[in-house]
Amino acid sequence: MANRKSYAELHAEVSKRYPSGQTPGGVSVDDIVQLKLQNSYDTHLDIARDMAKVMREDMAAYDADPTLSTQSLGCWSGFHAQQMIKSVKRLRGTTKRAYVYLSGWMVAGLRNTWGHLPDQSMHEKTAVADLIREIYVSLRQADEVAMNDLFKDLHAARKAGDAAAEKKAIEAIDNFESHVVPIIADIDAGFGNEHATYLLAKELIQAGACCLQIENQVSDAKQCGHQDGKVTVPREDFIEKLRACRLALEELGVDEGVIVARTDSLGAGLTQKVPVSQEPGDLASEYIKWLDTDAITDENPVRDGELAIMLNGEFVKPKRLPNGLFPFKKGSGRARVVEDCIANLTQGGADMLWIETDTPNVAEIAGMVNEVREAVPNAKLVYNNSPSFNWTLNLRKQVRDEWIAEGKIAAGDYPEGNELMKAEFDASELGQEADARLQRFQHDISTQAGVFHNLITLPTFHLTAKSVDELSRGYFGDDKMLAYVKTVQREEIRRGISAVKHQHEVGSDLGDTFKEMVGGERALKAGGHANTMNQFAAE
């Protein structure tokens, strides 16, 4: 937390009010200081303001050194986010450059009251803000539990009269790093018009989001980025929604808030309307030029109800589907992506880009980004390392094609299609090279393609399905209790996962501490000798 006061500063402040060391009601200064330090933020809007500064600092660091990219995993509950950040902190000793991604897909699929729904903006829009709040409640509670443990060390040192241990405990309190990290929040296509986008953006920001990700699809026809049937809006329409998000951030005082403009144009072959062009070269004309059209001839005249436009000096008919949608020219997606990105940065005021792709290919993405950077040199991306890609198959195909082109292997040395997925190729030279590329994929895409942030949208969806299946197969099969102990508890203990002490993880010790604060020796505590969590005390 920025500008957090030290233990000594807070103790001095509170002691000025209560020189005797306690309030008239008998509450101790030490207990007040502890609660102030545990309560890291007054509101979630304060979190949004603070985390915006964190992201801006990380963006500046990345501009100076593109190896300093950031990462996140998509989380569909506060507990998932909490355990992810705890794991990062345990691994690295810091939470720096680790964020939480809030996926609209997972809100639709797992966090709405209408059941498991596809990623088509059919879920309640309030569910997105609710999940942001839940994530920050969980991350803040992780702070409270950890800080309470540090204060227990402080009290134990004082009770033992160990000045060195007391000093060490206070240093640990002062140097404590919060579990609160930035959230990149998916607002889909805005859930309505530009005013609806603004109202929802405010809700997400007030829930704690410092970064909003919005896409250029039609709101009422929104599809998952990796499905067919995507329909984009004219660039002016999307820019208005970018402005709506910026106004929401500015109004709420999140002056350094971040907007990620996502373009789905690479896989979107349709638009809902033909925009009005005021002059050659404006945003509308640059959008219209990609429409798939037919020449108007005696054999193909304009009929009642049809639309004709002037394009490149002649009247043509835009092709139109039975549902009224207009198709773009085949193969125009890449060029539209580049134009979208430049317009979103230069005219929409977006801070970063998201290019939704159909395969994970570093060279393809780098090629588009390099074109964008000719107009906007410091353009940065958020990239979706999507579970919708068959990563094993994609990377093995890429290696196979490259090696054939280089003459390293013959076409018959490895199969061409889905056969490459077989486990027999895991230990092969090709399989190992593909895995090596997977391991460095995020590094490569960050250093070669301007990707500031790598995320996986749906990992906890798939992880939950796999983990529950793994436990269920054993538990309801032959292994019974061994399945739980072997696949869950034993691994928790050996990895040092704090959730193995599940009572402590959800704040049981916090409750004991508070009871002591207000009741002293009368406190009825849960953490006594009969608490079974003591079986894990040595771990």
Image: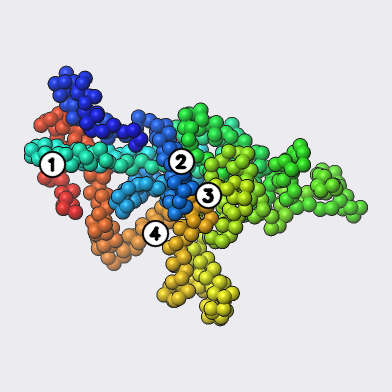
Q: Nearer the viewer, mark 4 or mark 1?
A: 1
- Which SS class for mark 4? helix
Q: Residue furthest front?
A: 64
Mark 3 and mark 1: span between their CA atoms? 48 Å
> Which residue is painted at 23% across and 56% down in the image?
493
* Amino acid type of the residue tagged 3 in the rendering: Leu
Asked if the residue under mark 4 is in contact with the one under mark 3, i.e. CB atoms within 8 Å, the reply is: no
Label drawn at residue 56: 2
Question: What residue is at 41 percent from the left and 75 percent from the top?
Answer: 427
Q: CA distance from mark 3 to mark 2?
A: 14 Å
Name the residue carrying label 3. Answer: 381
> Which residue sits at x=18%, y=20%?
18
Gap in angstroms between the C-alphas marked 1 and 2: 38 Å
Residue 378 percent location from the top left of the image: 55, 47
Q: Quadrant of the N terminus?
A: top left
Q: Amino acid at mark 4?
A: Lys
Camera-nearest residue between 316 and 378: 378
Q: What SS does tag 2 mark? A: helix
Left or right of 402: which side holds 43?
A: left
- The amino acid sitting under disc 1 is Ala
Q: Image quadrant of residue 473?
A: bottom left
Which numbered disc, 3 or 1, marks the residue closer to the eye?
A: 1
Whether residue 231 is visible: no
Which residue matches tag 4?
A: 466
Q: Position of residue 370 (x, y in %)?
A: 59, 54
Q: Which residue is mark 1?
A: 164
